[in-house]
Amino acid sequence: MDILFSDFFQRALAGGLLIGITAPLMGVFLVLRRLSMIGDSLAHVTIAGVALGFLTGFYPLGAGLIFAVAASFGIEKLRKAYKSYAELSIAVIMSGGVALASLFFTLGKGYNADVISYLFGSIYTLDNTDLLVVGIVTLVVVTVMSVFFKEFFLLSFEEDAASVSGLPVKMLNVLITVLTALVISTAIKIVGSLLVSALLTIPVAISLLLSRSFRISVILSVVIAEIAVVSGLVIAGIWNLAPGATIVLLLIALLALTLAGKKGVRL
């Protein structure tokens, strides 16, 4: 139990709580726009940036963030070029991210162990700089979402109607994708690039089953994510388990229980 009061665990808890706000908040709009897989795409690109950061001595999380934001513009450019095949943009960017990551892995054999920690998450290694970056991203995401909540709502349900009503659809699309890139690039050190999509989508999947109101669904998804993050970190800390995996498995268990309850199955 002493681990729960250690400095590194408190930093991990703070970082997890911050990502627990931003990930499902962005996830709601991604799910509604049928762009759930964008998380995997940007996560792979972020890993490529992290690998390059280790190679060049640049702050790895910062390099990953730059790569993710650049990739977000690429996704929007491709989505515009292939309007009828929006998912194609995600596949292309993901392929590029995997290719770059593989190349940098080959060039930096001495750093592979460090990069691999970002694949599965290394929340216990968060330092004050990491927390500052996560905190700034959280502030930016929450602020932008508060200001443009109604516009994002309309864009998610009916993009054509949003365009007809005079909303700057192109700018809003880019803004959502860039914010998603920021969230994913800061979340990979917490839950890992292989698991980050779960934090974006599973809380949303649960909230959509429990709520008929969009606003309540947004709030509920954040609450569910925070419960999973705190519970997962405590369980992982006490029993020496992988934190990211524990958080995701808890979310899956909550989804299964919710589905069973909706079907009237006795638990």
Image (tube, rainbow, N blue to C red):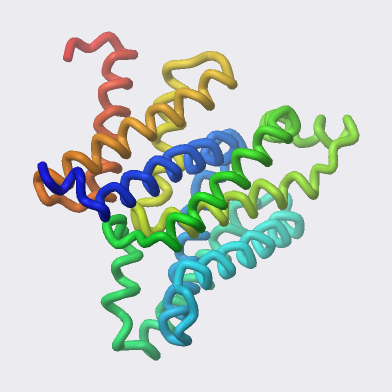
Judge left or right: residue 140 versus residue 18. right
* Residue 86: x %, y % from top left: 65, 51
Instruction: Please tell me whether residue 104 is drawn above or below residue 252 in the rendered image.
Output: below
Instruction: Please tell me whether residue 151 is drawn above or below residue 141 in the rendered image.
Output: above
* Residue 16: x %, y % from top left: 37, 45
Closest to the observer, 3 or 213: 3
* Residue 23: x %, y % from top left: 48, 43
| Residue depicted at x 58% and y 21% | 214
Closest to the observer, 190 or 197: 190
| Residue depicted at x 34% and y 13% | 262
Label tally: 0
| Residue depicted at x 30% and y 80% | 112
Residue 77, picture quadrant: bottom right
Say whether residue 12 is visible: yes
| Residue depicted at x 52% and y 72% | 63
* Residue 237: x %, y % from top left: 16, 47
Instruction: Please tell me whether residue 209 is drawn above or below residue 204 in the rendered image.
Output: above
**Quadrant of the rendering where the C terminus is positioned:** top left
Task: Farthest residue to the bottom: give it.
Answer: 107
Say whether residue 194 is visible: no
Judge left or right: residue 209 versus residue 242. right
Judge left or right: residue 134 versus residue 77. left
Residue 116, picture quadrant: bottom left
Instruction: Please tell me whether residue 219 is drawn above or below residue 31 in the rendered image.
Output: above
**Quadrant of the rendering where the N terminus is positioned:** top left
Closest to the observer, 108 or 134: 134
Closest to the observer, 84 or 57: 57
